[in-house]
Amino acid sequence: MARPLRILVASPAYWPAHAFGGPVVVLRELVSRLVARGHEVDVLTTTLQDVGEQPARRTSRAVVDGARVTYLSTPLRYRWMGVTPTLPAELARRGRPDVAHVVGFRDPVSTGVAAWYRLRGVPYVFEPVGMFRPRLRKVALKRAFDATLTRGVARGARLVIVSSPGEGDDVVSGGVDPARVRIRGNGFPEPPPCEMDDALEGVVPSGAPVVLYVGRIAAEKGVEFLLEAARRLPEAHVVLAGPDDRHGTMRAIEAARADPATRGRVHLLPPSPGPPFHLYRRADVFVLASGGENFGLVAAEAASVGTPVVVSDRSGVATAFGPGEALVVPYEKEATIAAIDRVLSDEGLRRSLAEGARRAAERSTWDTVVDRQLELYAEALGQRLC
């Protein structure tokens, strides 16, 4: 690109709000690496930190990884949607960025920033991070929002950025012109050096096979498939690490922990402030049996340390794995349990999947992702990369 860019990033949550899952981690990686390449990045977000915590009512500012982050006063919220009354004043006092990057959908921050810059002719790209297709809760209300308050977000964007072909299909089926849809993908992380301590010492007996899930404890994540795997595979210990998303899934976990058939073999751990590489390394298999993920960063994190991965074909990250690099299965209980059983019972398969996982991680680097993102900014601006 001919010169450093002034980039405004808008998101309903930002670091350290890691409880909101992969999109926050991905966005931090992207922003920090854009800064490292000499670009000036400002982030506008809410003060949301967790689903169960009240956000701060005062605006605060911080420098995070070299980016200027403004956490806007958030006196009201509903789940991940924070109401930020000072957003218009904040935008008015800022200079005009070269390009804006709107992340998220149906929340006041992304909707407000997109509308503000659309009316002022500032080019922006829109990244819905898996939220574009209405699903799970209040689908009728989401469709009403899409037909009224948020209908201009995608229409006004120069480009709509998705992380997988499946997410691209979702936005096109939702009415976005396919000529404006671009796949960027996400990178696999660079893990820290291996620690020798057993991450599950005192939780799981030494040498016991571990089936790991990391992420929000939520509906359509396939958690119930893992609980059934614990019932059918009497030697296996299922470890679940993440925040309760209040979908009711936690009740099934507590029931399994009390059930004599699985008591002592279903373990619930709190979320960690960063990727839990210590858990990935201890696991015999990592499972993301989700019914819908625009990407699924946790599977990439597990693969980066050579943990065998089982992932559903409804997770965008599945397309980042080549043959022999992961077991990709339908979003279905029997298929998931059979895949887990195969990995746990076949040492040769575990070794080959571990090697394949590392190959996938070495191929999908964050440097490549940032190169692609800069190409997309240049396209949105009608420029060419030098």
Image (cartoon, rainbow, N blue to C red):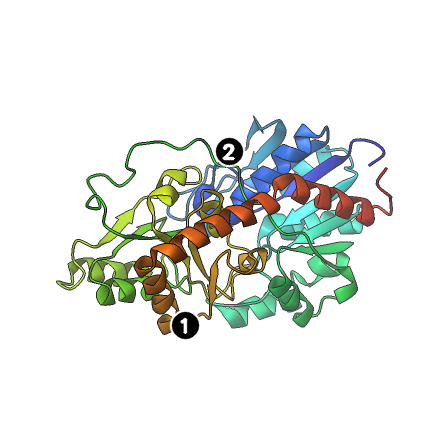
- Tell me the kind of residue under disc 1: Glu
Whether residue 378 sits left or right of residue 148 in the image: it is right
Locate residue 40, reporting x and y percent.
71, 30
- Tell me the kind of residue under disc 2: Arg
Image vertical order of residue 4 relative to residue 383, above or below = above
Query: Disc 2 designates what residue?
Result: 58
Locate residue 29, reporting x and y percent.
58, 38
Query: Disc 1 designates what residue?
Result: 332
Dot in front, 1 or 2: 1
- Can the viewer see residue 83? no
Image vertical order of residue 248 relative to residue 49, above or below = below
- Can the viewer see residue 235? yes
Residue 351 marker: none
Whether residue 353 sits left or right of residue 186 in the image: it is left
Locate residue 125, reporting x and y percent.
72, 50
Name the element at disc 2. Answer: loop
Real-space CA distance between mark 1 and mark 2, rounded to the nearest whole angstrom: 45 Å
Which image quarter: residue 88? top right
Image vertical order of residue 74 relative to residue 258, above or below = above
The quarter of the image holding the N terminus is top right
Label total for image = 2
Give me the residue at 63% from left, 44% from top. 10
| Pick the front one: 373 or 306 | 306
Q: Earlier in the sequence, mark 1 or mark 2?
A: 2
Give me the residue at 16% from left, 59% from top. 258
Locate residue 136, reporting x and y percent.
46, 67
